[in-house]
Image (cartoon, grey):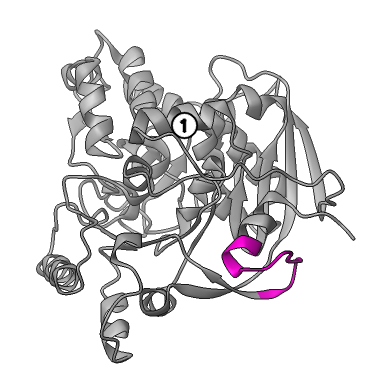
């Protein structure tokens, strides 16, 4: 009998079974359910079900991050609806417009840990696989069902392994690795699969960079992502959430067989960029050198952590951003902002001409705090660049690493 992958062990425990196999349909208990402020339909569907209580108020969190603060009356009404819902059902975990993005605040709240089953109404929920969790995005109606029962059905995914060896050069980040993989493998090669990242490169990679790889796994079609938790994972959780993870450290069985294994040596990798209008339209930044930009965005759940802000601060210290360029800095959470302020990063960026916005998703989702107009060009540290993603359908968005974004803001071009 073939062994189980760590992800399958998590799902087996959540389903109350000794073993699960790829393709099997299970009913699994949820450890954390997160709802964003753009999904009032969760509340409407819950009410339509005639439910009178939620399965466990302590395991539910509402996050106001996409409209932080609200930029329209309807957005404000949606948040008010959710505030009342939380009050009515005893849900204390409500992170308001000054707290940050779901994928960062859940970590800081201690709700994202190894071995947990996490569902959030956000596609980039694959991020939490970097901490050894099974985490996936969920639609509004399915999430309403979770709020009632605490369970959901899942098809146990196959697991595809990406083994990374070699040492990244100083100007290359995890975002460049993710873009390289997208350019080589495409946006659908991991459909409804768990994408595991491993190898010596991962072992040396800090947790914040591992989060980037797992975040981008959904752009490759993945249902979830996974990186085996280690001392770095535990140290990161202790630093951000003040907890010593007590979750079982699931390990793969030695005889587990992956559906596929892809091996890459990243030692010679150069900075990458995804060109309009697809995140797998990838090439070295050097091939797009000289393209003028109007806006540079440093933020989102993939590019707004203190380490990203610090890199931009280092590049721009004592300098000014290019004339005619807007550099937007949107920290991933209030905690990340506070640390960036304490380290002096924010003051240096403001002196360089950057604009600091409220914590949250910001310009990434194209609803406020930095939309781009017709004919404008934006280079972004966020994850997507399809038409209209960050504003006008007639704009161009290039996806790159925080380092590339900061350098483009300085020079005014890629």
Asked whether the viewer can see residue 317, the reply is yes
The quadrant in which the N terminus is found is bottom right
Mark 1 closeness class: few <14, some 14–19, many ≥20 residues within 10 Å: some
Taking the spot 26% from the left edge, 21% from the top edge, the residue there is 321
Which residue occupies the foreground of this view, 251 or 357?
251
- Identify the residue under disc 1: 208
Which x, y percent locates residue 269?
66, 24
- In the picture provided, is 288 more to the left or to the right than 35? right
Taking the spot 58% from the left edge, 25% from the top edge, the residue there is 205
Which residue occupies the foreground of this view, 236 or 283?
236
Examine the residues drawn in magenta and state their main secondary structure: loop
Quadrant of the rendered image containing residue 17:
bottom right
Whether 117 is drawn above or below 399: the answer is below
Which x, y percent locates residue 230?
59, 31
Asked whether the viewer can see residue 326, the reply is no
- In the picture provided, is 59 more to the left or to the right than 335? right
Q: Which residues are magenta?
A: 12-25
Indicate whether residue 51 is drawn in magenta.
no
Whether 354 is drawn above or below 107: the answer is above
**In what element is the residue under mark 1?**
helix
Quadrant of the rendered image containing residue 148:
bottom left
């Amino acid at each position: 009998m073939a062994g189980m992958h760590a992800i399958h062990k998590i799902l087996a425990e959540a389903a109350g079974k000794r073993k699960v196999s790829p393709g099997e349909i299970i009913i699994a208990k949820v450890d954390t359910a997160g709802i964003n402020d753009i999904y009032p339909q969760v509340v409407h569907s819950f009410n339509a079900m005639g439910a009178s209580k939620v399965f466990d108020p302590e395991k539910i969190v509402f996050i106001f991050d996409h409209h932080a603060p609200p930029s329209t009356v309807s957005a404000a009404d949606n948040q008010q609806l959710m505030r009342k819902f939380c009050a009515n059902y005893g849900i204390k975990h409500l992170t308001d417009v000054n707290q940050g993005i779901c994928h960062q605040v859940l970590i800081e709240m201690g709700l994202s840990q190894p071995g947990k089953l996490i569902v959030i109404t956000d596609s980039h929920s694959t991020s939490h696989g970097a901490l050894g969790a099974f985490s996936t995005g969920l639609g509004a109606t399915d999430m309403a069902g979770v709020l009632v029962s605490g369970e959901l059905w899942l098809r146990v995914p196959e697991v595809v392994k990406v083994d990374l060896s070699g040492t990244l050069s100083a100007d290359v980040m995890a975002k460049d690795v993710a873009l390289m993989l997208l350019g080589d493998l495409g946006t659908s090669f991991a459909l409804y699969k768990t994408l595991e990242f491993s190898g010596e490169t991962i072992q040396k990679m800090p947790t914040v960079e591992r989060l980037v790889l797992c975040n981008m796994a959904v752009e490759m079609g993945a249902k979830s992502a996974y990186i085996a938790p280690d001392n770095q994972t535990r140290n990161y959780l202790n630093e951000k959430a003040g907890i010593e993870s007590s979750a079982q450290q699931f390990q793969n069985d030695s005889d587990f067989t992956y559906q596929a294994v892809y091996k890459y040596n990243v030692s010679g990798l150069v900075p990458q960029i995804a060109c309009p209008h697809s995140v797998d339209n990838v090439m070295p930044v050097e091939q797009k050198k000289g393209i003028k930009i109007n806006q540079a965005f440093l933020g989102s759940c993939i590019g707004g952590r203190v380490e990203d802000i610090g890199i931009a601060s280092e590049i721009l210290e004592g300098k000014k951003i290019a004339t005619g360029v807007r550099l937007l800095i949107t920290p991933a959470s209030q905690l990340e902002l506070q640390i960036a302020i304490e380290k002096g990063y924010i003051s240096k960026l403001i002196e360089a001409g950057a604009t600091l916005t409220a914590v949250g998703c910001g310009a990434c989702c194209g609803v406020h705090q930095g939309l781009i107009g017709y004919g404008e060009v934006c280079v972004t540290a966020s994850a997507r660049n399809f038409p209209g993603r960050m504003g006008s359908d007639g704009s161009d968005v290039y996806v790159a690493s925080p380092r590339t974004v900061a350098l483009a803001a300085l020079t005014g071009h890629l």
